[in-house]
Image (tube, rainbow, N blue to C red):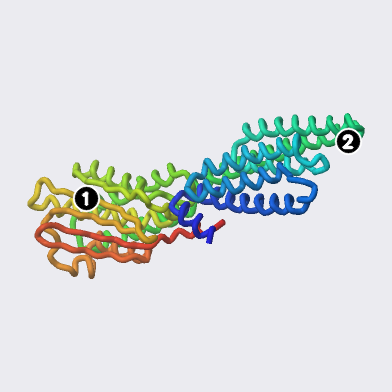
Amino acid sequence: MFFEKINRIYGRRDYLTRKRAYHLYVTDLVIFIVSIVACLLYIKQGIRIGFLIFAISALVSIGFLLINRLEAAIYSILYLSLTALTFGIFFGMQTGNVYFSMATIIILFLHFSNSKLTIAVSCYTGILMAIRMYQYWGRGELSSAFIFDTILKFILFCTLAIITVRVLSSHKKEKEVFIREIHHRVKNNLQILSGFANLHQNNGVKSGDKQMEGFNERILMLSKIHDAIYKSETDYEIDLNKVLEEIVRLIRIQNDSPVELIQCENAAPLSIEISVPFAMIVYELLNNAVRHSRNGNSKGKITVELNFTNKRYSLTVLDNGPGIQKESVWSQPKTTGFTLISIMTQQLKGNFRFDSNEFGSKAVLEFSNQDLFASLL
């Protein structure tokens, strides 16, 4: 039940944010359960204040997660856990083992913060360790060899942990660069271009110049979409609002047409694989709207609106031109534009309808959120 709630809250955020929320939620649950068990096992010997604060920090973090405050949830578990360690050393059971707690907190900071903050926390926990060992040494409970061994091993652990995370981050960045440069989308887009050529050869248009103009415009559109993908934060998803912005900007430049764009405020990011067919449909619809809105109406108005409700997208393109009188033009397409719309709608597993009358035209594309990455933990 709680996992479903987390998914509802963060399901519309980008991939990395969702993963951080899921990971933090699981971490909070484990910390809370372990802390409560530790407190109950030795309840007769008194309250284990360190573990008690640790458990409270997990609850606070979960509370922030459930009200869509991810950053507050992260910082609450990090700094309250550090507070728990401090209180545990000075006021907790003196016979308890705090060294694994120190390592746990360092790993927490490594995963949910940055290296600089982790180094600072490592130094702080090292000081706490030195204080604890000095107390033991003063009572004659530890030898100097044990103290130095522990401190040196702690320094080694912190160094290796930080270096490991840095190396993994470097590999991740290197992988992203390679993905952006040689991803298989290159092959897919070459196939798309080949399909464009076949369509232009068989669409019955006699003017070769007109064919090449349309062909080049579509290639330019694809380059704009890949530019938006390149600028996206992850290699997995893209915000469809950004795709729309690029296409509308291109249409305005190519046709000097006023196009009103109404973006979706609660849109869920989608797989990048969906962005290309979606962009092609939008581009064809806008080109069609530009042509027909200017037919007998020099001040044609075009509106593009994207909505997201019940995990389903709805794209609407409106124009106030004379419209298309024959339904067969789009239901049984023979032109290049509507043929592409039909093919790409099938790829999206969506529905397309086109309503037209003397007051204008309305094209509606509907498809589901098919993001496979949203379900991965």
The amino acid beneath tag 1 is Thr
Q: Which mark is residue 136?
A: none
Tag 1 residue: 303
User: Which quarter of the picture shows residue 118?
Assistant: top right
Residue at image point 81% right, 37% down:
153
Q: Against 153, is 349 above or below?
A: below
Q: Is residue 262 left or right of residue 169?
A: left
Q: Against 118, is 5 above or below?
A: below
Q: Position of residue 119 (x, y in %)?
A: 67, 32
Q: Position of residue 96 (x, y in %)?
A: 80, 43
Q: Mark 1: which secondary structure? A: strand
How crowded is the residue under tag 2: few (<14 C-alpha within 10 Å), some, or many (20+)?
few
Viewer-closest of 68 and 203: 68
Residue at image point 73% right, 45% down:
47
User: Which quarter of the picture shows residue 165?
Assistant: top right
Residue at image point 14% right, 52% down:
293
Q: Which mark lies nearer to you, 2 or 1? A: 2
Residue at image point 73% right, 50% down:
39
Q: Is residue 266 left or right of residue 360?
A: right
N-terminal-most mark, 2 or 1? 2
Q: Position of residue 204 (x, y in %)?
A: 20, 63
The amino acid beneath tag 2 is Phe
Tag 2 residue: 146
